[in-house]
Image (spheres, rainbow, N blue to C red):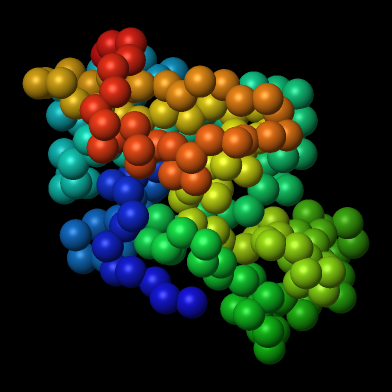
Amino acid sequence: MTKRREPVVPALIVIGLVGVYFDYITPEGNRCSCSGCGDLDYFLRRLTEGHYRSTRIDLHASVVLDKRRPLEAHPGFAYASPMVDLCLQPGDVSRFADLARGSFLADALRNDLVGENNAFAALVRGADEAEKIGVPHGPLDEVDVERYCRWWRTRGARTGVLLRDGTEYRVTWHEPVTVGRDTGSETPFLDWAEGGGHGDVLS
């Protein structure tokens, strides 16, 4: 597994049930995130007004992931989904089990040494089980941004690309897919960003 110091996309902007957050990589290669309450319109308005200049990154061509629909129907998806690393190349997986092997904290969680019915213990066991049965990734494994978005997209989420038009930002949304199937491009958001597709101006 090889990690790039540069992100594959500028940022991943996620719309959840209680607000919007985005993950990004600083010019120095540090992983950071910003979050806040409010909808996408509010986020884009603040972006246009320059409230995120401290990130020192250009959010043009960032990936947008709207998780609200699947989370409203299945809140447990928040725990079942993999995690994302913007610097992973397509197809790469960073296994939690590899990181936790020999970890005192992980062992304590596995053995319920921190209390019964601990949610973190359940996640650790889920990650261990995912490795045992050979699934592509478990709930604490990190995957590349394309696979992460596809996981959510095939469960009812929608994806798009954030584009800058002068001083305003808009999101070009992809067509919805049949839940459980995604027969489109392996990198639909990258294709759309490079093609400069047009969408609704939301700012």
**Toward the viewer: 84 or 105?**
84
Instruction: Return the x and y of residue 15 as percentages of the image width and height.
Output: 49, 29
Instruction: Return the x and y of residue 201 as percentages of the image width and height.
Output: 28, 11
Tell me the residue at 34%/32% (across/down).
Answer: 192
Tell me the residue at 40%/37% (across/down).
Answer: 189
Could you tell me how many numbered marks the image carries? 0
Looking at the image, residue 77 sits to the left or right of residue 60; the answer is: right
Looking at the image, residue 132 sits to the left or right of residue 53; the answer is: right
Image quadrant assignment for residue 110: bottom right
Quarter of the image for the C terminus: give it: top left
The answer to whether residue 29 shows anywhere in this view is: yes
Instruction: Return the x and y of residue 16 as percentages of the image width and height.
Output: 55, 29
Reply above or below: 59 against 203: below
Tell me the residue at 29%/23% (across/down).
Answer: 197
Looking at the image, residue 145 sits to the left or right of residue 193; the answer is: right
Instruction: Return the x and y of residue 12 as percentages of the image width and height.
Output: 40, 42
The answer to whether residue 22 shows anywhere in this view is: no
Image quadrant assignment for residue 112: bottom right
Tell me the residue at 51%/66% (across/down).
Answer: 92
